[in-house]
Image: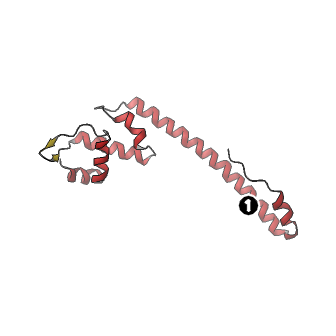
């Protein structure tokens, strides 16, 4: 299939397809004259790349997993996916702590607003949130 058909079947842009090809992510693409000739394996690889990107993988992360191989190492790909999930969980935990601290500060400000005479004293003694 030519690039127009690959675009229609994958939803990827011509620019993205050429980028993936230039980075070695699609594998070798034969040519017929000046036209690239893609097959089902290129479409499958393209869909895999787009799916991986949709869950947070960068092209730089995908390159060592896909460049120069006919078939992805699914075990290795799964290990990277699990590591990505662990990083997401850690970030979610950090964001939950931040949200809790923001809630505490909001409640403190609400109490201060209820008693405007204390507002300056309480706010001056509020420490900056620590989110580590």
Residue 3, given in percent of the width and then of the height, sits at 21, 50
Residue appearing at x 18%, y 49% in the figure:
2
Residue appearing at x 81%, y 64% in the figure:
111
* Frontmost residue, 132 versus 95: 132
Q: Is residue 114 left or right of residue 41?
A: right
Image quadrant where one finds the C terminus: top right
The colour mode here is secondary structure
Residue appearing at x 57%, y 42% in the figure:
89
- Counting every numbered tag in the picture gives 1
Q: Is residue 79 left or right of residue 122?
A: left
Residue 43, given in percent of the width and then of the height, sits at 26, 44
Q: Is residue 93 left or right of residue 65?
A: right
Regarding mark 1 in the picture, which secondary structure is present there? helix
**Name of the residue lying farthest toward the left:** 33
- Corner quadrant of residue 41: top left
From this view, report whether residue 105 is shown above or below residue 85. below
- Corner quadrant of residue 48: top left
Residue appearing at x 25%, y 53% in the figure:
7
Query: Callout 1 environment at 10 Å: few (<14), some (14 to 19), or many (20+)?
Result: few
From this view, report whether residue 15 is shown above or below residue 106. above
Residue 119, given in percent of the width and then of the height, sits at 83, 66
* Frontmost residue, 34 versus 5: 34
Q: Is residue 122 left or right of residue 41?
A: right
Which residue is tagged 1?
106
Residue 128, given in percent of the width and then of the height, sits at 75, 53
């Amino acid at each position: 299939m030519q690039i127009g058909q690959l675009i229609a079947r994958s939803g990827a842009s011509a620019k993205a397809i050429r980028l993936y090809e230039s980075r070695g992510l699609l594998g070798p693409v034969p040519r017929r004259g000046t036209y690239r000739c893609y097959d089902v394996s290129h479409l499958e690889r393209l869909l895999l790349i787009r799916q991986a990107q949709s869950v947070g993988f960068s092209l730089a992360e995908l390159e060592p997993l896909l460049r120069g191989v006919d078939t992805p190492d699914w075990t290795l790909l799964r290990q990277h996916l699990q590591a990505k999930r662990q990083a997401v969980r850690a970030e979610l935990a950090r964001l939950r702590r931040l949200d809790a601290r923001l809630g505490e500060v909001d409640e403190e400000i609400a109490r201060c607003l209820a008693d405007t005479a204390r507002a300056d004293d309480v706010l001056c003694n509020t420490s900056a949130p620590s989110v580590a």
